[in-house]
Image (cartoon, grey):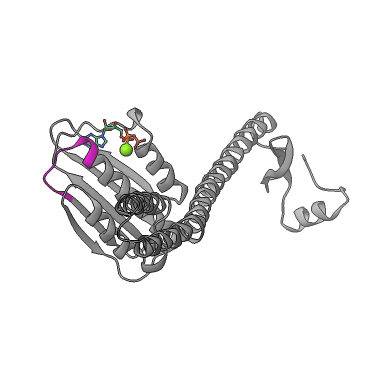
């Protein structure tokens, strides 16, 4: 618009009220849709005082459109990552529940029935007694294995007792001694507790698989706005996410809830994994 005098319409009237004499505007298009408009205005008398104002404005709004599209895709990607992690967790939790309430309960009652049958079997049927006791033993083995699987899927202790007790359970199960220092009181947002649990679980499994460290240090600290989890061993180092899926999985999990993962593992100097998870966004 080179001038607003004599132009009808509410925008022209408002422009005149504001003392605007000329303007250059260009639409902002995001992914083929009109998203908005950018307008530069001048109050000086005469026409638009900038050379190539239209072309420059159009170039700029094109950049703005691309930037908005990128930001929107990034936000959508973050949201979909978070949804994928949440859905996977919910599925694991459901399978754990199903195992606990279904197969595990049935095996427990089967073991009781077998023990009762063993007790009722006449003592002179020694071979039958031995056979029954062998079956009970194998059944107990299956139950233990199933319990381990359920624990790996979604530990009930995490849902019931929170992070502190769940990490204690992990530390007890670790074949390498664990020095555990948890400075986080009370319950934390569920996605944070679950992510923190898997970080420690994967780091301890890796330490047991690849490092022959004498001790693994696990420190968890509630820093008010974020939870910091650090796992460190002083063994051979050289951990590299491209050789597996565990560390990449942790990075995805951390980033899905707005957190970060930092791995330092120089050869010969141990491995340190630090994960920071925001507490206010979850
Ligand atoms: N604490 C560690 N000390 C030395 N090397 C390690 C350590 N942790 C991991 N690594 C090395 O880094 C690689 C990648 O680890 P990552 O956990 O991502 O995958 P993985 O353990 O091989 O397989 P997955 O976790 O998928 O079962 C491992 O294969 C191993 O060689
Ligand atoms: Mg691993």
User: In this orientation, which residue lies closer to the viewer: 203 or 58?
Assistant: 203
Q: Is residue 46 visible?
A: no
The reply to whether residue 254 is in sight is yes
187 w.r.t. 138: above or below:
below
Q: Is residue 137 left or right of residue 270?
A: right
Q: Nearer the viewer, residue 45 or 129?
A: 129
Which quadrant, please, contains the N terminus?
Answer: top right
Q: Report the residue at 30% width, 70% height from top.
A: 185
Q: Where is residue 68 drawn, in percent x and y? A: 60, 41
Q: 31 or 174: which is nearer to us?
A: 174
Horizontally, residue 226 falls left or right of residue 237, namely: right
Residue farthest to the bottom? 186
Is 59 placed above or below 96 here?
above
| Quarter of the rendered structure image containing ligand 1 | top left
Q: Position of residue 41 (x, y in %)?
A: 68, 46
Between 83 and 8, which is closer to the camera in this rendering? 83
In the figure, is residue 20 to the left or right of 112? right
> Residue shown at 23%/48% (left/top)?
231
Residue drawn at the location 39% of the way across and 49% of the way down: 149
Q: Is residue 114 magenta?
A: no
- What span is in magenta? 208-216
Classify residue 185 as left or right of residue 176: right
Q: Position of residue 103 (x, y in %)?
A: 49, 55
How many numbered dots are placed on residues in this image? 0
Q: Residue furthest left?
A: 214
- Residue 155 in the image: x percent, y percent? 39, 57
């Amino acid at each position: 618009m080179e001038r607003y005098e004599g132009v009808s319409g509410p925008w022209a009237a408002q422009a005149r009220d504001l003392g605007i004499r000329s303007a250059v505007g260009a639409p902002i298009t995001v992914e083929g849709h009109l998203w908005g408009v950018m307008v530069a205005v001048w109050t000086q008398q005469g026409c638009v005082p900038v050379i190539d104002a239209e072309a420059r404005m159009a170039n700029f709004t094109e950049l703005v459109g691309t930037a908005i599209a990128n930001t929107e895709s990034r936000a959508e990607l973050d949201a979909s990552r978070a949804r994928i992690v949440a859905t996977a967790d919910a599925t694991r939790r459901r399978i754990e529940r199903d195992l606990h309430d279904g197969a595990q309960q049935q095996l427990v009652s089967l073991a009781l029935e077998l023990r009762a049958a063993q007790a009722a079997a006449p003592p002179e049927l020694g071979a039958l007694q031995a056979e029954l006791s062998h079956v009970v033993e194998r059944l107990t083995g299956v139950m233990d294995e199933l319990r381990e699987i359920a624990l790996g899927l979604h530990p009930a202790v995490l849902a019931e007792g929170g992070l502190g007790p769940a990490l204690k359970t992990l530390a007890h199960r670790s074949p390498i001694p664990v020095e555990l220092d948890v400075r986080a009181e009370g319950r934390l947002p569920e996605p944070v507790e679950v992510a923190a649990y898997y970080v420690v679980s994967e780091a301890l499994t890796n330490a047991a698989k690849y490092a022959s460290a004498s001790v693994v240090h696990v420190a968890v600290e509630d820093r008010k706005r974020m939870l910091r989890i650090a796992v460190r061993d002083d063994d051979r180092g050289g951990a590299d996410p491209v050789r597996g899926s565990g560390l990449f999985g942790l990075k995805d999990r951390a980033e899905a809830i707005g957190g970060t993962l930092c791995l330092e593992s120089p050869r010969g100097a141990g491995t340190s994994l630090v994960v920071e998870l925001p507490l206010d966004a979850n």
